[in-house]
Image (spheres, rainbow, N blue to C red):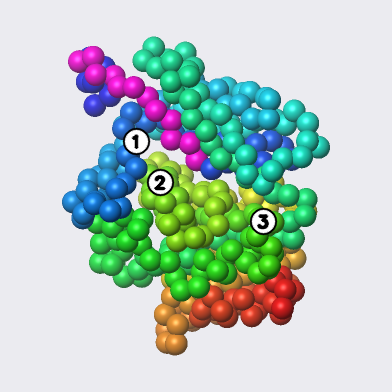
Amino acid sequence: MRRLRKRWGHVGIPQIQAYTGYRTDVGTHVRGRVLNNPVEPPDFANDDWWDNLIDTYRRFASDEVPNVALEVTFNGRSVRCMSDREGYFHAVVPDANENDPRPFWSKALVRIVGHPNVEPDASMTFARVLTPLNLADFMVISDIDDTIMHTGATELLTMAKLTFFANAKARLPLPGVADLYQRLQRGGELSHEPRNPIFYVSSSPWNLFDLLEDFLEINGLPDGPVLLRDLGIDKDKFLSSGHDHKLEKIRALMLDYPSLPVVLFGDSGQEDARLYALAAEEFGKQIRAIFIRDVDPGIASLFDDHVEPSIRRSKHAGVPMYRIESSDDAIERLKALNLLPN
C-alpha cells in the first residue's frame, strides 16, 4: 500500500505521536511513532458506537512512516534517531548536567527533520517527561487490564465489545483505584504534590496508547509513562511473546532505578502473579510488596488456585505477595507495611 501511494503521489504528511517519557541516570527515554493517520481526539459528547468502531479501525490500520529522521531535545541536549519499519522511534537524551534539578513533570521537544513533506517546526510536538524525585519513597509498576480498568479479559465477548465499540469514557475503572493510586503517588492523603512515580505496563499494543491516556485522565488516575508492546507476527512480538514482555519492561525499569524500592500491582486473570514472582526471585527485597487483584472476588475459582503457587514462590524470595479483593484491602496492607501513613 505504501509503494502504491508513493507511485500515485499520495505520500502523506507524517505526524508524530509522542508517548510519555521518563528520566533516568543514563538519560531521558523518549518514545513515539510517526504516522500519516493518527486518530483524532474523540468527541465524548457526541461519538457513538460507529465512531468508536472507526477509531478502533484507524488505530489498528495505522499508516506508519518508516525511516524518518527525528530530533529530540531535552534539558538543552539534542539527539537524532530514525523511525523503524513500523514508524516507532526511541531516543535516549543524555543529561547535560546530571545534578540539574528538574520538576516531576517536564517536556521534551520532538521534530521531524529532513523530510520533503513537512518542515521541522510544522511537525514539532512535545513529549511529557517524568523525573523521579530524590524524595521518592518507592515507585509503582502497575498492570492496566483488570488491575485498574475493567476489561473483562477473562470474558471474551465483554473484552471484544470494549475493544471495538467503546471509547475511553465508556471504560470503567475498578472501584477505589483512583484514590488508591493517588495516595500512592502522593505518599499519603495530605500531600497534594506528586512524590512517587507510577509506571503502567500492559500487554495491550501501542495502537491503544491514546485511549489509555484518555482513560487515566478521565478517571482521575495519576499520570505516568504507559509502556505497551508492538503488535505483530515477528518472533519477538504478539504471537509468541505472550505476557512475558511485562517482565522485560519491569526488569528494565528496576535496572534504570536500582536504588528505588518497587511496589507491583497486577491481577489474577492472566500471568501477572507468575511474572511478578520471577521478578521477586531476580530482584529480591528491592520489591517491597506485590498486589494481585482478584478478578472474581468472593468466589473460590481456578484463578485463585493459579495465584497460590506464585504467592509461595514470592514469599520464599523474601517478597510478600497479596491477593486482594478491593482497593481498600490494598490500602490496609500498604499501611501495615508502612508504605502509606496510618
Please say if 323 is above or below 194.
below
Q: Residue 34 versus residue 110: which sits nearer the camera?
A: 110
Verify CB contact (< 8 Å) between mark 1 and mark 2. Answer: yes
> Do the CB atoms of the residues marked 1 and 3 lie less than 8 Å apart?
no
- Residue that badge 3 annotates: 193
Residue at 61 percent of width and 26 percent of height: 73
* In this picture, residue 266 sits left or right of residue 139: left
Q: Which mark is residue 268?
A: none
Dot 1: within a 10 Å radius of its alpha carbon, few (fewer than 14), some, or many (20 or more) residues? many
Query: Reading the chain from its start, which is encountered first: label 1 or label 3?
Result: 1
Amino acid at dot 2: Asp
3D distance between C-alphas at marks 1 and 2: 10 Å
Q: Which residues are magenta?
A: 8-19
- Closer to the chain start, of discs 1 and 2, is 1
The quadrant of the picture occupied by the C terminus is bottom right
Q: Is residue 13 magenta?
A: yes
Q: Nearer the viewer, residue 1 or 51?
A: 51
Is residue 273 at all visible to an observer of this figure?
no
In magenta segment, residue 243: no
Q: Relative to 269, say whether 206 is above or below.
A: above
**What's the amino acid at mark 1?**
Pro
> Disc 2 to disc 3, how far (Cα)?
25 Å
Q: Nearer the viewer, mark 1 or mark 3?
A: 3
Residue occupying image coordinates x 62% and y 23%: 79
Determine whether, in the image, residue 323 is placed left or right of residue 59: right
> Which label is found at residue 38?
1
Q: Nearer the viewer, mark 2 or mark 3?
A: 3
Residue located 43% across and 30% down the image: 16
Which residue is tagged 2?
A: 210
